Image (cartoon, coloured by chain):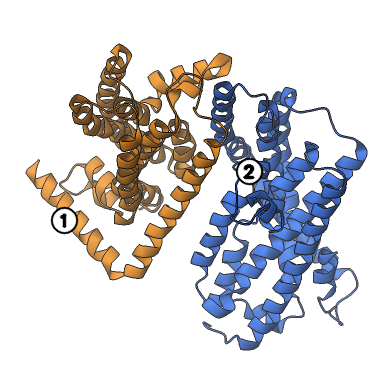
Chain colours: A blue, B orange
Amino acid sequence: MSLVSAADQAPPPAAVPPFAGLRIWFTMLAICLEERLVYRGDFIIGTLMRFLPIVTQVFLWTAVFNATSKADIAGYSRNDIVAYYLLTMVTRAFSSMPGLAGGIARSVRDGSVKKYLVQPVDYVGYLMAARIAHKLVYYLVAILPFAGVFYVCRSYFPPVPDAGTIAIYVLSLVLSFLLGFFMEATLGMLGFWFLEVSSIIFAYMLVQYLLSGHMFPIDMLADIPTGIAGVSAADVVRWLPFEYTAYFPAAVWLGKIQGATLARDLAIEAGWVVVMAVACRIAWWRGTRRYSAFGG
Amino acid sequence: MNRYLSILATFARACLVRDMTFRANFLLECVTSLGWMSMNLAFYLLIFTFTSEIGKNTGWSKEPFFAFVATGLIINSIVQALFMPSAEELTEMVRTGGLDAVLVQPLDAQFMLSMHRVDFSSFANGLVGVGLLGWAVSRMDYQPSPVAWLLYPLLILCGVAILYSLIIMLAAATILLGRNQSLYDFWFYLTNFSRYPAEIYSGPWGGPIRMLCTFVIPILLVVNVPARVIAMPLSGEAWGLVAAALIAATASLLISRLVFQAALAKYRSASS
């Protein structure tokens, strides 16, 4: 829904023939595609290498399971943990936005953002289109190494969930893309106020690293007290946006979240998408109002 | 030798002056590396709320494991501070031809290329590592003997030497290939295997990984041997590991030196 709101607000250029925007968009996509395919071998190896840290994590958890002789930890068997790590890779492929916040802040700092102020192009809409193109190309090439790894590791996965769960999984992935996009874009917009946002981005990445769940399933925080009676760390994290960029879709696929909780969490995720989309828009309006161009 | 030491001291002084010129940036870099480290420590603390040990009967319970983590922090901070910044620059030097300027200087090229920059902010993690080691050892049931304390710094140096050789090998690959953007990535993925006790690599997949990372690329000896010496009694097996670490450090220094020289001999300048 926010995708629509962001794209809709782009004022349609009057003198341009119909579908010109679409054609530009497809040209952009084609260029991205060609760029990626030039180094396809390097790219596939690079994607495969990203699975290596999971190998050590899997051995670590296997050792932990051996030592406890418990069948499951926080509801996860050893096989679930392996499947969980692999599934968070998929979510990260949707929600991670490398270079987005830094790129926006840089365009503010070096003044190149002003071309979006004078052209009949909405900056956020443009960034979104470019990012979707980038992601589509990424999936097109990365699907090979991903499929290979998932096929090799298929025995770790529980049976494929029913169609309803898969639909919710896909929906949660799309929302995680939007959430990641609007969070990073808003962070980048802070560049209007601070010029140098790398330390803010760093603080965000640090919190993200721990609370998104790409190191461990958030369910493991269920017994960590927060000081408030009856409220665990997991309960707090549930209401924050971070876990929806790695943990949530993976947990949905594995059937760890069901029924009313699933509906509530999905609503929280959608709520955060709206909040961040609005925040991004407000930051853009207020930021461009106080913006003064630097550089030639 | 004295000449090289004084040149190294000059490099270090220049880098310290540079770091201290941008003090806020320096502090920020310290905070950055401390931030990542504390996130990892939080993860380990979380793991120990579910188990009392990493691997059944391996002896890596909470305090010894944190001594292990501390050892890793110390070794990695030394490597990150002394060698990594120079190695990262090398990639660019090969591409732009800046390497030529180094080769014509009356100094050993490997020395120049691997030690001309010192990143003092990376020592922050090492200091925390020393503190963490003290905390972990004081809370352990087993107390390391004086011999273990004497061996420990030596084995830390062996670990640093093995990692340094790895950097030199990757640098040699950079020179041969002309371009190696993923040098740092590759480094990260390889050293990733040294982060945890070797005992976790067991079973049909873990066994070969353990063999490979002990004897072929001795990455598992880097942290494991010093950590074991300080956290566990010096048994027969431990002495074997100490010997292995010493041999591996010497051998990898020699081999990496040879490979690096061979790569330099093959180097054809990129510039005109």
Does residue B270 appear anywhere in the picture?
A: no
Give residue B39's position: percent from left, percent from top: 50, 49
Q: Please give the name of the residue rendered at 30% of the width and 49% of the height, measured from the top-left corner.
A: B127
Q: Please give the name of the residue rendered at 70% of the width and 61% of the height, measured from the top-left corner.
A: A181
Task: Give neighbour class at mark 1: few <14, some 14-19, many 20+ (Cα, 10 Å).
Answer: few
Give residue A155's position: percent from left, percent from top: 74, 22
Amino acid type at mark 1:
Thr
A231 w.r.t. B253: above or below: below
The residue to which callout 1 is attached is B10
B223 w.r.t. A175: above or below: above
Report helix, strand or loop for mark 1. helix
- Which numbered circle lies on residue A223? 2
Does residue A90 appear anywhere in the picture?
A: yes
Between marks 1 and 2 in the image, the one whose residue lies nearer the viewer? 2
Tag 1 subunit: B
Give residue B81's position: percent from left, percent from top: 31, 49
